[in-house]
Image (cartoon, rainbow, N blue to C red):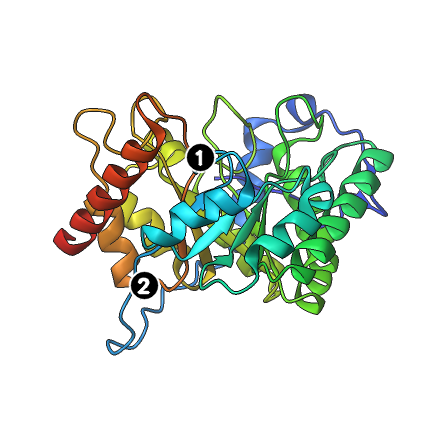
Amino acid sequence: MFFYRSGAIIEGKHMNLNRRKFLTVSALAGIVSATTPRPVQAVTLPDPSTKARLRLSCQDTVAPGKTIAEKLDFLEANGFEAFEPHGKNLLEIADELQKAMQGRKIKIGVICGGMQGSLISDDEAVRSKAMDSIKEVLTAAGALGATGMVMVPARPNQTKLEHWEARELLVKVLPEIGEHAQKVGMHMLLEPLNRKECHFLRQVADGAAICRDVNHPGIRVMGDFWHMTFEETSDMAAFVAGGKYLRHVHMASRKSRKMPGEDAGDNYVDGFKGLKLIGYQDLVSFECGLKGDRSKALIAAAKLLREQWEAA
């Protein structure tokens, strides 16, 4: 459990506290006894009439094809509902993407990444750069009809803040992003990663708790089966903990982050049970590498997910 002091970050500046020297065992005990923990909100399951749906999406780097139009042709022919571009080059491909989407049933779903810097950096200039780049991607993505943008608060070595300070700062700055996201018809999606890829935000429940504290409809969380393999004790429990805040899911094989089904024993039934319990209505998108033929592997993976969805 993490404890953090309200007001420790003032006007975005880091107060230099040496907590190891400051907090003795007795002082920590005093804080625990004096602090009334905020109760965790109970998960409210949807009305039983709300039936979850498996809506498949695929990232641009995963779909077979040399052009965006070829990728969309393949995905549409194989029952995919959405296409997931990357945010880093969204402005460069916007015209091609817009033209390729005309007259199709498949839609642009979520935009993956594109942020520069870190929202929880101890450097104000880095935070400002992150805020500006996020708004830029959100605006461009909203104009293209996308529904959300995936964001990782910080990669390794992007902040020197203590965990509690970083969390407090993130909760403070996210409402501004949520407001901008809502104006352009989007959600900002917090993505938990595994401990080898980040030190901050590693579980779906943590992301949901941040969404709860931010309390803005533009801020939501997502789950990624690859990262969940290492950080969650139960896929089902993780998604149930995400509850109403969960708005996106990424797929990959469980051992090597390849195409689902390319690792022996790839199983997502437990997680799909959780998605069904919360009446999940959003996208399940492929973010992975592959070992074999791209077209055959993606068709086989989609078949596997549909079968396991039915079994859940």
Q: In the visual, does 245 lie left or right of 45?
A: right
Nearer to the camera, 20 or 178: 178
Q: Residues within 10 Å of mark 1 (few under 14, many from 20)?
A: some
**Type of amino acid under label 1:** Val
At a point 87% along the width and 35% down the height, the residue shown is: 125
Q: Is mark 2 on a helix, strand or loop?
A: loop
At a point 52% along the width and 47% down the height, the residue shown is: 69
Residue position marked by numbered label 2 in the rendering: 278
Q: Is mark 1 on a helix, strand or loop?
A: loop
Q: In the visual, does 157 lie left or right of 297?
A: right
Residue position marked by numbered label 1 in the rendering: 62
Q: Residue 234: percent from the left, percent from the top?
A: 27, 41
**Type of amino acid under label 2:** Ile
| Residue 165 vertical placement versus 45 (above, below) | above
Q: Quadrant of residue 67?
A: top right
| Marks 2,1: beta carbons within 8 A | no
Q: In which quarter of the image is residue 165?
A: top right
At a point 48% along the width and 62% down the height, the residue shown is: 104
Nearer to the camera, 207 or 30: 207
Q: In the visual, does 290 lie left or right of 102?
A: left
